[in-house]
Amino acid sequence: MPVAVAHRPRINGSKTNHYGIEVAKGLTWKGWEPGGEYTKHVILKNVKVKTQKLKYSNPNTRFFTTLYPEPIVLSAGTSFSLPVTFRPLERNKYEDCIEFETTDGKFEVPIQAVLPQHNLSLPEHLNFGMCASHDHVQVTFELNNTSELTTKFVWLFDEPFTLEPSEGTLPPKSKCTILATFKPTAAVVYETVIECCYGNDLSHKKNLRLEGIGKLPHLLVSAPGKNPKALQNVNIESVISFGDVAIGTTIEKIVELHNLAPVNVPFTISHPTRDTRIDTVFECIETHGMAPPSSVYKIPVIFSPHTVGEESADYLHVQAIGNMSKTVVKLVGKCKGPQVSLASEVLDFGRIHPGDSSTRSLDIINESDVPAAFQFMIDGVESVFHFSIECGSIQPHTTQTIIVQFAPSHPINYYRRVTCLVQNQYPLFVDLIGTLHTELNKPAVLQPKHLNQYRTNMARGFSVFPPEQLNEMVKTGKLQRDPDGYLMHPPSEMLEELLPPAVSLEPMSEYFNDGHHGDIMTPAHVSIDVCQVDFDQCDHQGFIEQKTLNITNHTKGKITIVWMGNDSHVFSVTPTTCDIPPLKMSSFRVTFKPGGPNRFFGSELEGYAFYKSMRDYRLVQDETFCPPWCLTVSATGHTFQPGHETFLPNYTLDVNKVVFPACDVGDSLYKTVLVTNTGTTPIRYTLEDDPNGIFKVKPTHGLIRDKYQLLIFKMTPKEKKTLRHQFQCRLNENDKHLQVIEMLGSSEQPKILMDAEGVLYFKPTCVGTSSRRGYKIRNTSRIPLHFEWRIHYADSKYIKVEPMKGTILPNESQSHLWTFTPVDDRKYVLKPHMNVDDIRHIGEVARRQQFSLRAAGEGSAGELKADESFIDLSDVVVNTAIHKDIVVVNNSNCSLHYTLHVDQLLEGSYAEEAMTVDPLALELDITQDILPARSRRIIRATVRPVRRLTYNFRIAYQLLTPDSGGNHPLSEGHYPLCEMTANGVYPVVQVTDARCYGSASGISKARLWGLFSLDGLNTSLDCDPSIEELTYPKPTRHSTTRKAPVNTRTVMDFNFSAAPAGCEPCVVHLMLKNTGSVATEWSFLFPEDLHLELEYWAETGEFDGDELHEMRIMDNKLFTVEPKQGWLAPGHCQTLTLSYSHDFSGTDRLPVLFKLTQGREILLNFVGVTVDADRKYVHFPSSKHMFSPVPVGLETDPKQIYELYNGGAVPVQYQLDLTALQYVQEENFNHKIFECLNPTGEIAPGTTANVEWVFSPLESKTYMVNVPIHIIGGDTALITFTGIGYDKRVMGDTVQMNSQLQPSTVPSVQSVPIPGQLVYLSEERVSFGNMPLFSQSRRMIYVTNHSPNHTVSFEWYVTSAADSQMVEIEPVSAVLEPGESCMCKVSFTATGEPSFYDLDVICEVTDETIMANYRRDLAAWEAEKTRQQYEFTINDPNAPKPNVRLCRQIAQENGRQSPVSEEFKRYQTLPPIKHTETEKEQKDRQYRERHTDTGTPLWEKPEVPESFLLHLGITARTHTIAEYQSNFPNAVQKYFIDRSMSERSLSSSLGKPAASKKLPDTLTEEEEDLVTGIAANIIRALLDDHDFHEALREIPHEPVPYFTQFGEKPQTLSQMGMKIMDIEKTGSPLPPLPAPEKDMPDVRTHTRATVAEVSFDVNSLTGSRRQSVKSEGHMPAESPVPKHIIAESIASLELPARSLAQSSLALHTEEDYQQSLREERKRIEQQTLKRLSEFGNVLESVLENTIFNIVNESGQGEVNLTARPRIIALPPSTPPNQSTRRGSSGSEAAPSRLTRTKVGSIKANNSMRSRSPAGSVRSGGGESHHSSAR
């Protein structure tokens, strides 16, 4: 509804409150003039409960004045009025203020004086609401001139908004009404802002926002109580059927107009045929109206039929405003009339005697529900037959009995056919027969059978012969009798076939065809020249002229005329009896003897004519009996004298306008008009005939003595046109009483209006299919027509129509459905035609009309295609639906009827079972449709997989052909359309990375992976959910108990390990990745998230121990998950933060449900352990441990590791009870199946101890043993160790030899960032795989500083001293600038026994930027501390207080303790029962804690920044050489096996050098002062030493030294050979070989040793191997070539050499022999060197360092390894002659190339040294490698 919204009133009131003083917001003066004085008052009111004192100041300007400022004292609730006077001098705006001051504050009251301005008040916006397009909505509002000036205004607006008046002038303080109109033209939202310009120059503007919504009108029409379904009708029509309605009545029906729009919709109703047709029977009074929004509007329609049996059809057009929608309403109704009948057709009175009378009863029956008037056309006064009721009215469904009396006066036969006229119905006839016998005359008795016999004889032409002649003809054989006894001609003279057929007259025609009124001249036996005798006005009653009647005998026998009545009657005929010879005429006179003056007289004279031979029964035979003919003459007259008024006629007519239906020329139609005499006097009426003879009436005159008089009007058109005539009915012989009865009719021929000018076009149709189209025809005539379509036989197989024939009513439109079925690809032109007949003349060819139709169509070959022949829906979540639009294209020029078929194929596990059980997973919204030509259809395909399978769908189509019975397949085959595939999947997420910090910072990623069972979790998440898990597809609160029922059987532990109470929480970051191809919604549901919130009365209040435990965990939030739910797109990741707070001692367990929407449910048991500070505790995540499978029959079984983690705060000693191992050994032939190598040990707090085991199976089976692990001073745990032995010969390659203890998928790359992490490793897990013993493998990792502005340093550590024997990392430490990365080389040496290795190496990262700040702050703090220790205080009260900062440590020494003890921080379960501090009290307490009593702030001692730890996991498995060659024959060549390692013991000690040991964490003050003093004295002495300064100056000028280790220079092979030869010559024995070293340095055991310490000790142990690399190619003294090898080699050389020399003394000299011997010895020496392990080590070191240098230079950007090779031609550096000479000697060209290589090597090594200041892991070996490379 349109509304006008006025300006919003100001929210703030006129007064305000300042510090308890209520005062006006300001004072404003208006309407002032310069020179005047105006005073207003400021009212001050004290609204407080206490007295207030105020001060105020005068206004600043001189134009405002007030009282002299004096204090104002206001008691509670009192007021004070302060007058303010304004004295203006000019017409300007004045502003000022008065300032008031109270004890609480100041406030101002503004005062101002304003000038009058133009101002108009109008609404902010007008909302017209919704309005139908092309309609309008009007809103009025007031425009107020609130100013004191005459204001002119003008509106600026645009369509569709208009405002009236658009401009005007408003006097001051006046208003006017504005009419706003909104008339939309489209269905859109109109929003606009119009401007109202006002003022003298229209410079002021105000905006008015106008809003309106245009809506399209939508009207539908339906019958009452039915839903509008106009679109389902072919003609888009709504049919209103009135049914059968009685003639003369009017019925009203309601047409419901449904307005579906939310707005008022104006509409119009048109009746096209109302003014063009003469017989409109339907009428709609309303021609226009307004349909309310979203409602039903009822329109009355009236049906008034006037022709019995006529079916009427008409149309109304309902059109919405703007011609937006048009609905056609078809009105159908039928007129029904009375159904009156007589119970008997013949009344036989029999034979009676003179003076007697006979009576019979006649029932008249009305079988309809329409009342009707009836009239028997007989005058009972003059007739021998007298009816008790000659006219009357019979009600519906009633029967009325009429008594008929027969009183004859002449002895003759009596027969009269009496007509009974019925209103609005055809006449009824009753035959009255009787016979009178006298003593003298006894005619034959007339019987009913004689009537039928007479009609037959008359039809055969025998009735014109008298009976005596017929008897003679029968006797002579000229006539015979037929089987029915009727006369007939002999067969030889059969004339009946030549005679015209007997005309069967309709009742109306029979009534009219009396020889005077009718047009059909039937052969009459006796005729009378007049039927009416009118004596008119008789002035002289004594003398009235007689009227003459002439009667003609048309028969061939003599007839006798007998008139009823006598001379005493008013009307009489003389002579009464007369004989007329054959074919002769006789005259009679009619006499009128009126009985009184001023009266109307009328009567019907009755006479009978019969053959004279019928007077005696002896002259007549039964078969030749002929009944008499009744002659009637109507006689009228009146005796009203001239000048006398006749009776005033009182009458009514049922209709005064008679409308005849249309008919053809020559046809006759009849209508009845009922004249009702409502008065008590008779009415004489006279009607003149139509001079054109088209309209006739019977009777034309008469006297209405009774109540009713029925007039029958007849129309017989002579030409085709509209006919009109007015009958003048003259009543009571007075021209004043003229009643006009109008006649309307028309003569028409059948006429059909063909749609589209008789042309029907079919759209191109697919060959073999059918297309259907409706074709409209309309009967434009007023004749009901019968039509029949005729199609040529040759065309009948292409085209057909429904219906083929039928009836079409006048003014009716019909739609005929044509079907076109082409059989080949071509164009068709077919010419059917329609024969139309008048329904009254069906079959008459002469009257038939023919209308031709030209049908054109085209046959076309069509097919369907899909835009995408293959549709891949990818992955779809099981039990969910995905929609895909399939675009089906019809490229042909014909419409195609088709149906779709789907075949489903499944792939995957249980596919065959699913094929038989599961329903079709593909649903199509359209499976059968019609696709128009050159168009496309979008079919929505819905795929809903129910299993984790691959669904393949093949969609095919089949063409259909439509017919009346539906659509039938065109062929049996299916044509492929497209294929669709979809994979039913479940949402899948995986944990791709895990990190921990806080109390779990010392736990490696591999251990964390096991604690959280992430491998099992990922495996479970990848499995299909069970049916129970899908009970609630989404997270739902469904549990009414605290313990929610779990629908999953998969249970995992999330073990947060153990930590001492009060330490920082254990924080775990998990990287959750959506590894599937569908989006995943996940959530962690705590028990409270599954519990329904019950009403208070439903809670039991009883909780068991587990529930209380869970409630304590949740209330204190010991376990947290952030975020608890989320959504992941495919391939996306999200970091989860899980934390466990160590607040309460004990083991905490909490079941948490991990739920994937539409996917798996996994119950996660969050487990965390908090240990007391003094408790000895080892954390066992599980009571079971599985060893890696080991094959049976290994020569040396590998060592395996079982980890023990100390989760407490004190060291723990453990001891394994190995008694169970003895039992297993005894059961297995005293073979050690399980062997523990270190059953006892000690574990430092927060560290892990490795218990070494050897599992050696004897058989291929599973071994289990329960081993108690005792914790000294703690608990005992029983652990079940399980090992699997397998036969490799049986299993073959099915069991892979793992290189790890447990198969794991721990990611090697970090993807979860940790807060504060600056340095990242390129790999966090390095796997060396399977390695043979005595070999070495290397890996490269990068350490990268991702910080943009922080410099960091890192250093590598090992967690176990034994690990340093296998792991070497180079460089051990380095400094990384922002964004810099460093490449580290990780080397693993396989020594000792075959084992499994899973090592954890720690990289400690220090932020050097923060560390530098810490050192600077620490130095300042120490300086301040020193200053305060030696500073004294001057107790001078006048001296300024020193602004010094005291250290918190000093303050604490003075007795100030921390207000909150660390011991009680963890007790935060319940709030303390004490006074709660306010915010101000908390700030004061914090201020006191941070300041001294004098207010000096405390300065806390800087704390050392914590370093960040990175874990590097290293895994490997070592095998014996023989085992490795057997299992990995193809990988042996990848390793260099140093067999010399097996001859040396590799046991070493790990730890930092003594010089690098850290000082104790806690030092006494005396020790610290002692050390400080000694160091200060040494530094001071050095600074004073002059020689020290000189030595420092000479250091830069010293050459770079090359150091070497002390040792004996090794001998070369040639020297050894010469020495051996000398020994042989002298015969002295060979010196013994030096024994290998056995005494090794002690191993320093440290919990945390750097790799540098490890490498130092290893170098000292393996000095012989390292020194061999450094001594520039000489053999090491410690391991010379064995004596027997050299002796055998020389012996093998000398013997053949000597024999060769002796045999060829003549050819070679001794010098040649010695030369060849030397060359052979040199060759043997080289081969022997290649076989030495030392040579292999040197070669491996050279290659290793070379590759390392190249990769390192490439990483620094110095070398581009991916660049294409280039050849640079350099100019010669020497003259050509020199180069030629040098080129002749190949030995001189090599040094230049060697020099260039050496420079590059030196550069690489120098750069490496600069990046590795801490040295390499293998210090001695590193130098050897560099020298070798050089």
Image (spheres, grey):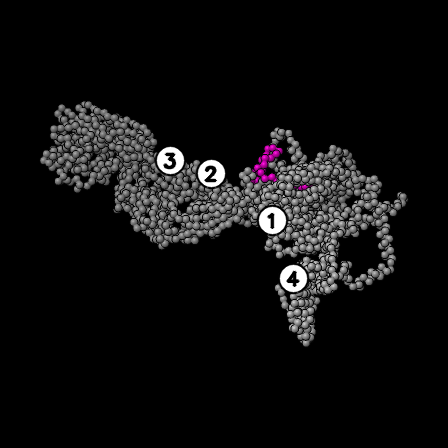
Q: Earlier in the sequence, mark 3 or mark 1?
A: 3
The prevailing secondary structure element of the residues shown in magenta is loop
Q: Earlier in the sequence, mark 2 or mark 1?
A: 2
Q: Earlier in the sequence, mark 3 or mark 4?
A: 3
Q: Earlier in the sequence, mark 3 or mark 2?
A: 3
What segment is highlighted magenta in the picture? Answer: 1031-1060
As measured in the structure, the alpha-carbon distance from the residue carrying label 2 to the one carrying label 1 is: 85 Å
CB under 8 Å between discs 3 and 2: no
The percent coordinates of residue 317 (x first, y second) are 42, 43
Asked whether residue 1232 is drawn in magenta, I would say no
Give SS at disc 4.
loop
Q: Nearer the viewer, mark 3 or mark 4?
A: 4
As measured in the structure, the alpha-carbon distance from the residue carrying label 4 to the one carrying label 2 is: 86 Å
Residue 1760 bears which disc, if any?
4
x 71%, y 62%: residue: 1673
Give SS at disc 2.
strand
- Work out whether residue 960 or residue 775 is closer to the camera in this orientation and state it: 960
* Residue under pointer 2: 296
x 84%, y 52%: residue: 1575
As measured in the structure, the alpha-carbon distance from the residue carrying label 3 to the one carrying label 1 is: 105 Å
Residue type beneath disc 1: Met
